[in-house]
């Protein structure tokens, strides 16, 4: 799929088939993640989760993560503020990496959804405990991934009135 098409047709997909996602495909998603722009010295870490028990544990502390029960794999995107060259940039770098995963997933024919963790303190701590993430590392989000069992059209959120030309 061409890049612009992958961006314009990306939607949050929360229902997945039982088809497994290969390690090679996950590797493509991780390469896409780490191709994101970085202002903070690549402050990211990624936890790849395929274990069913672990995936099923997240909805117990995060009500909006039920799709993980069907997901074949999830990637937790984490930031390490300690390696940042510029303070606070981990958040933007990790968000850019997350969006790259979502677009790449769509381009590869997968369905994916951003599962928010940061800045909800209880979710951050619960995910740290579940995945053994060190206390200095902040999980920004998870991305649930699988082959889509639902179809959605493009979001059509373009609103010309939000665009200001030359001046506000
Ligand atoms: C920061 C952030 C956190 C999100 N957290 C969740 C979440 O916890 N659960 C969920 O189902 N969707 C989550 N989403 C996905 C949004 O609900 C979704 O992007 C929005 O409804 C627009 O739909 P679309 O992605 O299909 O265009 C999150 C999106 C962002 C950007």
Image (cartoon, helix red, strand yellow):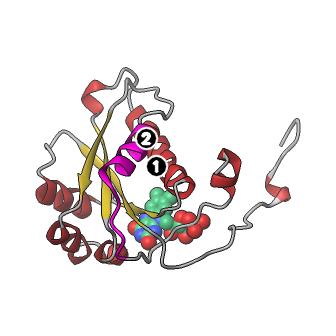
When the figure is inspected, residue 22 is found, relative to residue 164, above or below; the finding is below
Residue 69 place in picture, x, y as percent: 29, 77
Q: Secondary structure at mark 1?
A: helix
> Dot 1, how many residues are within 10 Å of its Cα: few (below 14), some (14-19), or many (20+)?
many
Residue 22 place in picture, x, y as percent: 33, 55
When the figure is inspected, residue 119 is found, relative to residue 37, above or below; the finding is below
Residue named by callout 2: 33
Residue 26 appears left or right of 137: right
When the figure is inspected, residue 3 is found, relative to residue 37, above or below; the finding is below
Residue 151 appears left or right of 91: right
The stretch of residues the image draws in magenta is 18-31
Membership of 155 in magenta stretch = no
Residue named by callout 1: 101
Predominant secondary structure, magenta span: helix
Residue at the spot 53% in from the left edge and 61% down from the top edge: 109
Residue 132 place in picture, x, y as percent: 11, 51
Q: Nearer the viewer, residue 60 or 153?
A: 153
Q: For the view shown, which residue lies furthest in the right direction?
A: 166
Q: Earlier in the sequence, mark 1 or mark 2?
A: 2
> Dot 2, how many residues are within 10 Å of its Cα: few (below 14), some (14-19), or many (20+)?
many
Residue at the spot 44% in from the left edge and 77% down from the top edge: 15
Residues at circles 1 and 2 in contact by the CB criterion of under 8 Å: yes
Q: Which mark is residue 145?
A: none
Residue 63 place in picture, x, y as percent: 32, 77
Q: For the view shown, which residue lies furthest in the top direction?
A: 85
Membership of 24 in magenta stretch = yes
Residue at the spot 29% in from the left edge and 33% down from the top edge: 81
Q: Nearer the viewer, residue 109 or 79?
A: 109
Residue 113 appears left or right of 107: left
Q: CA distance from mark 1 to mark 2?
A: 5 Å
- Specify whether tag 2 is near ligand 1 (CB below 8 Å): no
């Amino acid at each position: 799929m061409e890049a612009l098409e992958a961006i314009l047709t990306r939607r949050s997909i929360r229902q997945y088939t039982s088809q497994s996602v290969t390690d090679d495909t996950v590797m493509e998603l991780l390469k896409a993640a780490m191709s994101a722009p970085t202002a903070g010295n690549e402050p990211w870490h990624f936890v790849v989760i395929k274990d069913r028990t672990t995936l099923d544990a997240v909805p117990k502390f995060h009500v909006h993560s039920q799709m993980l029960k069907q997901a074949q794999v999830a990637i937790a995107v984490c930031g390490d503020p300690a390696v940042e060259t510029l303070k606070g940039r981990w958040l933007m770098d990790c968000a850019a990496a997350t969006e790259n995963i979502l677009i790449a997933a769509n381009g590869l024919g997968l369905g994916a959804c951003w599962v928010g963790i940061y800045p909800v303190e209880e979710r951050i701590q619960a995910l740290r405990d579940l995945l053994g993430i060190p206390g200095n590392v902040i999980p920004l989000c998870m991305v649930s991934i699988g082959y889509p069992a639902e179809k959605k059209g493009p979001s059509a959120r373009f609103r010309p009135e939000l665009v200001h030309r030359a001046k506000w």
